[in-house]
Structure formats: C-alpha cells, structure tokens
Amino acid sequence: MNGVVRRKLTVSGQVQGVGFRPFVFRLAAEHGLTGLTRNTPEGVVVEIQGRLEAVESFALDLRGKLPPLARIVSLSSEDMEALADETAFIIAESAPGEGHNVLISPDTATCPDCLREMFDPADRRYLYPFTNCTNCGPRWTITRSIPYDRPFTSMACFPMCPECGREYHDPADRRFHAQPNACPVCGPKVRLTDRAGGLLAEGPEALTILARELAAGRIAAIKGLGGFHLSCDACDAASTAELRRRKHRPAKPLAIMVPNLDTARRLVRISPEEEPWLTGIQRPILLLPRAEGAPLSPDIAPDTDFVGLMLPYTPLHHVLLRHYAEAIGPGRVPALVMTSGNLSSAPICLGNREALRRLGDIADVFLLHDRDILVRTDDSVMRLHPDTAKPLFMRRARGFTPSPVFLAQDGPTALGVGPELKATLTLTKGAAAFVSQHIGDMENLETLGFHREVLAHLEDVLRVTPEIVVHDPHPDYMTTTLAAEIAAERGLPLAALQHHYAHIHAVLAENRHEEAALGLALDGTGYGEDRTIWGGECLYVDPSELEHQRLAHFSTFRLPGGEAAVREPWRIAQALLWELGLREPEPWWPWRAAFAPASDFLPQLLERGVNCPITTSCGRLFDGVSAMLGLCPAISYEGQAAILLEKIQDLSETEAYPCPMLADDDPAVLDTLTLFRHVLDDLRAGVPVPSIARRFHLGLAQGLADLAAGFAGVLGVPFVGLSGGVMQNLTLAVELPRALWERGLEPLVHTQVPPNDACISLGQAVYGRRLLQLGKI
C-alpha cells in the first residue's frame, strides 16, 4: 500500500436526486480511484483511495465540475486507514438515521437531452410526457421522505422495466441512479375524462384529443407537476371570458404558457436578462411587457400592460403544446392560459378525485395521470428589477422551494407560522431558513389543512423539530390559533412578533445583515402595537439585540366600514377628504354615480367613529388615490386599485408632490395627507390624471427617502430595509432605492422571497431563534 492514501469526504447541500453520486462514480474512475459513495444523514459520504496526487485532484474536481443541479454547501475531509483488498469504486446503499444535511432539489424543467429524445420518432420515449433524467424532472413534488431514493417517492409504485433498469444501473448513462426514471412501458400514464370522470381517451391519444378540445374553445383541468392548471386558448376572447365567469375571477391577470421563445416574442417584449429565466431550470411565470399588437385576448390582463408568461417546464406541457400548435394551424398563436386549478382562496387541487369534485363546474375535460403529487406547489411568479436585473418575487414556489435562504450564522430551530394572507411557513435549521412554497390565504379549513400538511412534510424531510413557535399578534388570525395549538401540543414556547417588524427582520435576514437598520414597511394591513392598523411605517430594528422602535408612520385616517373599505376604495378616498375637512359629499366625486346613498351616509360613520378603524396603511393610501382619480371605486382582487394607478402614469412627468415629515410628533408623521391634498388640488385644476398619478408616486418615494435620511443622520444607521407588499409596485421598487442611494443610504431589498406577506414567516422564524439564543424566552 506504499503511497496509497484513503480520505473520507462528507458533502452537504443539494446533492441528492441531482446525479451527484453518479458524478462521483465517474470522477473516481477518471482519477483511477477506488472507494465508495452513499447517501447518509450527514450528506453524501465519499471514501476515495489511491495516490495522493489523484486524491487531491479528485477533491478539486468535486467542487469544480458539479452536475447542473448540484450545489455544495459544506465539504469536510478526514484521512482514513487504507484498505488492502479494495479493487473498485461503488455506489453503496443509502444509510438510515435521524437528522441530515442534505438539500432536496426543487423540481426542474426538462433538459435539452430529454427533449431531443422526446421529439425523436425513433426513440422509445417519443412524446412520452414523463421523461426525465438526473439533470431534470420532478424532485420536491414527488418526495415523501429522505433519503431521496425511489422507494421514498411517488415513483415507488412504478417498477422499472428491464430497459429502464439497465439505464439506472449503467454508470455511463445519464439516467444512472435517476430516481424518477420511467418510460411508456413502465411509467405513469395519462388519460382524458369528461367532468364526470368518464374516460374519453388514454395514453398518447389523450393529449392529442385534449389539444383539439382546447383549440375548439373548451376549458380543461390539467394535472401537472405540483397540482392542476385550468387551461384554455389564451387568444380566444370567448374562452377566456367563460373561464373567468366559471372561476369567479373577473379581472385578476391570467398566466399563459407558450412553446418557445419565438412564440413568446410575438406576445411580449423580452430583454437579454429575462431570456435565461424563461428558458432556465426554474421557469417561473415572468411578468413581461405586452408586445404591441399581441393577439392575446383582452381578458388575459385587463388592468396592466404586463403579461405573466412561462415556457413549458414538464414533458407533458411540451407534448401538449406540440399537439396544440398542430390543432390550431399556422394562422393562430399557440398560447394557452395556465392558471392555478382552484377556486378563489382554496389551495390548488392535487389529486384526481379532488380535482373532479372541486373543478367540475369549471372544466369541460380533465387530463389526469397516475403519478401522485405529494407536495402541492403552485407556479412561481416574478419579474426582474429594471436597475439590478435581480428577481422581484410575487410568489415563490415551484422551481425554488425547498431551496433555503442562507442566514448569517448557525442557530436553533424555530418555526414561523406566517400571516393570514399570502401565507408561507418557515423552519430554520442551522444556518438555513426553509421558507415553504406559497400556501395562500388562511381563510378556510382547506388552507389550514394545507398549512399543516406543509409543516409535517418539511419537518420530515429536514428531520428537525422546532424549539419555538412565532406568530403574528393579530388575535383573529387563523395562524395565531394554529401557533398556539402547535405550541400546546408540543410543549414549546410561543412568541408574537408585530407584522411590520417581521417584514424588516425578513429582509435583513435575507441580506445576512445583523447590524441595526432602519426599515420602511409598506403594505396594506398589519395589526399594530397600539391596536390600530399599521401599514406605512418607518422602524428601527436591531436583529442582534432584538430592539424595536416605531420611529414614524404615515398620516392616520379611517377605514369607514372596515373590510368594506378595502373592497370599495371610494370609501377610503372620501375618508381622506374628510380628514382634509371636506365633510359633505360633492356631486363631482367620481364614485357618486354608483355609490351615492352609501356616500351620503359615510360622514355619519366617520363622525361617530362607528366601524371606522384607524390606519396608517400605505396600500390603502394607494387605493384612495386610485378611487379619487376615478380609476377603481371598487376592487375584485387585492391590489387592483394600485395596479391601475401605476399603469396610468405619465412616465415623462418629473414633478413630485411634497410629502413632508412632521417631526414634532412622537412617533414622527410622514404627512401623506399633504400628498393627497395635492392630488385633489391638481384634479380640481384639470391636470391630466396620468400626470397626477406619476407625481403621487414620485412624491411618495422622495418623502420616504427624506424621512429615512433624517433618522439615519440622527441614529447613525445608514442601512434601510425595504419590505411589504407595496414594494411589488414597480415604480416604488425602482424610485425608492434610487432616492435612498442619492441620499447616501444603502437600501436592503428582497431578492429571494417576495416582499409581500409571504416573507413574514421568515422574519418570525429568525426572530424566534434569536430569542432562544439570547435566553429571552
């Protein structure tokens, strides 16, 4: 054994289900090494034996030549005693055990090699809708437990045929140890049914007939990767209008899917920075500006100039769009609506029977398959920031979860249960925070069950148990009750963190920022420490010492009718006018024609303060301005009024309305009533509405930047965290950071999780683990 050494390498990270062990096998052969590799609770263990220079060269290549989906987080090394009788390198059986340092890969889009096979008539996987290999395919949505081996996935009930088995055991094949490996002989199959479940077609014919049905204007429910889509012809006004009617979704944008970039360019404008996101392994729905003359139905996105577009990410989608293009012929654009298969506020449908039961009144036909979806996962939605080209998420799910947010340091395990709307949950483990996929609005028992389902699955695959549970202090949130139940069931400490402080903790954690910072938390609703509704806040947050202070807020106003004011922004406009001293309704107000009786009664509510909660909400201010300008007196989906206000802006306008700080108050006040007064004055003076909308946006950005600069100078804190749903407004997302940089401040923004309430659970979890570290609970 002269000159022979043996070394053990333990690799943690995204190293299971991504072809990592086959890669190690081939790398060992290249370097003439013996040994073994296996999945273990600690990660992938590699024992290599050979000449010292070959062992060291292997270790360098292990990091430098990774497979496309692999990601190493840590790599430890220790010397071992060489074995005298070892003659080969093998992939050993996975080792059982509790706890692990493995990251399960997200589901990834079909790779070029698999696509080439799928569209080769001579290949045995020709047009097979479940083709995959170690470089692509389902991962997270089919994983029951760890280690990521076939028996622990929903492919366990599909024994491989001899040919697939040969590929699986051949180190030279890219399907070597590909756990979801399958073919038409042994793998999952599709079938097409009517809404009663009656069989219409199965196998390859099912997709062909489905394409014809869609081309004829039918609506389909399609079982995909993480749940069902509802689909129809995106260029047919009658089909999209009927889908909206049946789904009770009158105006909220609908996502579309097209087969390739060439087709996409007929519908939207795509920058060089956006192309890789459309064609890459995650393939989110990307918000892109509509191309002039695009032949899309006007019902796709009536309130915005942006279209949510994605390219196919599963073989099933590729095959369907191939058939669909043939069915409609060359004169039409092959674009399909692909919107979440659910009813309003309910989780996306997952199982065949569930879909037939819940979507039977919407879809005409159902494309089903027999591979179980184990984890409900919606499509991710994002856009790129114009200045930085970094992601700005609206929804983070398929393609990104369960990839963690890496934190600045190690810590105990904490659970953040999230908010009421756009809920996610977060579990921390070591120096990583695992933010769940989008769960939805916690307004019904189905979504509560989904929340519990996600928690159980995350705990199982991460092999962790939380040591603390953190929730929003709102007493009526379903998540508040859920947190108390979890803590009581397990005997865990329970803590509450105010909604907007959670926002700022989240953005600081995402940026691995552990120093004190200012935070601008801008959203629609959050239960404040004074029991009013916060939403336009300047905060001081020290994430290390857990010190919090509300430094300033927007001008207060009332929400007449409470939740009714959220649904009918004209109420907010009239309440803002009331704050300015305009107490009696005036006939020229834009909402008077539709809401005169209620408008006449509103001053009595405001005078008496009956069901008129006080707020500082930035989101509600946007709603009020939108209604004041006659754009949106009533909404059909959250954010509609603000979207219309942003859309109408005259981008050539450079004037900004004043928005001063009133420093004599404690907390200080950003005088947004003055901002609104200028909106009113210009409207009365006949200034065009697009100019007013732009001046409002610019004035708010400048006012917020001045506010932050004032406190930064006093406190000596140059960092400003930006969070809250209003930061999804593209104008504010661009103009506010620019204004802060101009004042010598450093903005910290979200790039890994959405700035909306989906980030709340992350802020809760990092706060909870710091509470444990400081011994404050």
Image (tube, grey):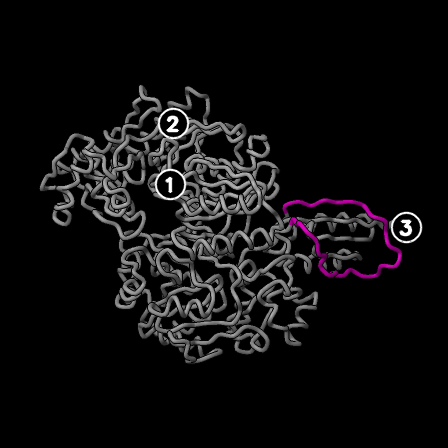
Q: Which of 7 and 99 is in front in this view?
A: 99
Residue 90 % position (x, y): 76, 61
| Residue 82, magenta (yes or no) | yes
Q: In the image, 775: left or right of 337?
A: right
Residue 708 is labelled as 2
- Name the element at disc 3: loop
Amino acid under label 2? Ala
Mark 1 residue crowding within 10 angstroms, few (<14) / some (14–19) / many (20+): many
Q: What is the spatial separation of the Cα atoms under label 1 and label 3, in whole angstroms?
A: 64 Å
Q: What is the spatial separation of the Cα atoms under label 2 and label 3, in whole angstroms?
A: 68 Å
- Name the element at disc 2: helix
Residue 727 is labelled as 1
Dot in front, 1 or 3: 1
The residue located at (38%, 76%) in the rendering is 196
Q: Nearer the viewer, residue 702 or 150?
A: 150
The residue located at (62%, 56%) in the rendering is 67
Residue 2 is labelled as 3
Q: In the image, 81: left or right of 458?
A: right
Please provide the residue range marked out in magenta.
73-101
The residue located at (22%, 47%) in the rendering is 632
Residue 642 % position (x, y): 28, 44
Q: Which of 155 and 212 is in front in this view?
A: 155
Between discs 1 and 3, the one toward the N terminus: 3
Amino acid under label 3? Asn
Q: In which quarter of the image is residue 670?
A: top left
